Amino acid sequence: MRVLVAMSGGVDSSVVALLLQRQGHEVLGVFMRNGVAGKAAQEKSCCSASDARDASVVADRLGVPFYAVDYADEFGGLMDWFAAEYRRGRTPNPCVLCNQHLKFGRLFSLADDIGADAVATGHYAIVRDGAMHVARDAAKDQTYYLFGVERAALRRTLFPLGELTKPEVRAIAADAGLVTAEKPESMEICFVTSGDYRDVVRARGGGGVPGRFVDRAGRELGRHDGVDAFTIGQRRGLPALGVPHYVASIDAKEGDVLLVPRDGLERDRASVLGVRWLVEPPAAGCTLRANVKVRARHAAAPAEVSVLDPGAVDVRFDAPVAAITPGQAAVFYDGTRVLGGGWIEA
């Protein structure tokens, strides 16, 4: 096949291009520029000019065509949404939307333009018989970030690393003499180059409403400079109250941030909207059993998922779950298979 490979300049996507070439496919590499500039971007961003250079060096070594495309406007829109979500008292997950709209949106349009049969990325996930499954390396599994991929796109998507572990990927790169073999991973949000997401929020429309820390009785426990500095489950940056307290909810309109002891974070229900299904969408009124993951590093918890309509579900967990956070994704699993997911509303 002719395969368009999203090359970020890291070891994972480098090995994807190598493996597909070894399998006999015609590989074309593409790098996505996010438009973030400056010294910090060179050091922190996974889409910097130095990353583009690394990706081009790998493509040159493999002898594959390489292109860099400018998605600065699209990333700018993503950053505006990111900032607006924090001002609403929510905790956004931009990597999910980036995958949904850019890597598996714009890139498929580009693939169509150049006559590519498939798009491949360095994500750790498995596609089998048109279904998405968790990766063999559970510590690296990235299916939480991929629930928004269209089912039609999934049929043209390749994840060559799904059956490999990270050490195996690095060993393949080292054996092939790729410059990215020992390159450190980028763990940050690509456009948060300062290390503080609040810099992005305040540069794109200003911070959130200032207000009070309160307890469940509504008593004031202190003051803060803006709700954009907080997320559900947060402990740092809060008033000293004798025993550890955590953020339980955020009223973005009034500026109130509710603080509770640890056990006050637990909930057994979640309302999930904007649901996308990677299986045949269940009918309204249907109830299914699933394991539900409410954040990337959360161990999926058993739950009953009640379908209100194809885009909205109510999740009832078998046992309470801590820090269910509006703005984060909830992803539904049946064993290793990804059923779908959506956005936590409440």
Image (cartoon, helix red, strand yellow):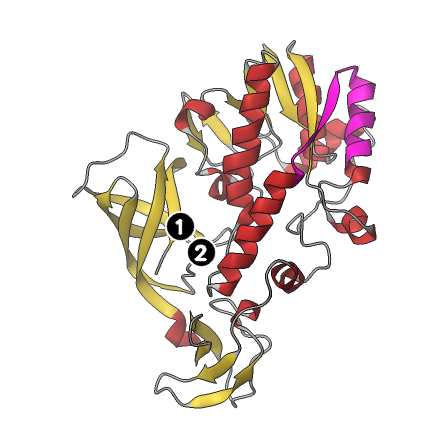
Of 319 and 121, which appears nearest the observer?
121
Of 216 and 115, which appears nearest the observer?
115
Residue 151, image quadrant: top left
Examine the structure image and report whether residue 65 is included in the region drawn in magenta.
Answer: yes
Q: Label 2 sits on what residue type?
A: Gly
Rendered residue at 55%/16% (across/down): 112
Picture coordinates of residue 333, whole percent (x, y)? 37, 41
Give the residue number, with chain letter if any, for mark 1.
Answer: 343
Of 64 and 38, which appears nearest the observer?
38
Give the residue number, with chain letter if any, for mark 2.
Answer: 327
Of 161 and 340, which appears nearest the observer?
340
Left or right: residue 280 compared with residue 248: left
Q: Residues within 10 Å of mark 2 (few under 14, many from 20)?
A: many
Residue 95, image quadrant: top right
As drawn, 223 above or below 303 = below
As drawn, 34 above or below 61 = below
| Region in magenta | 52-72
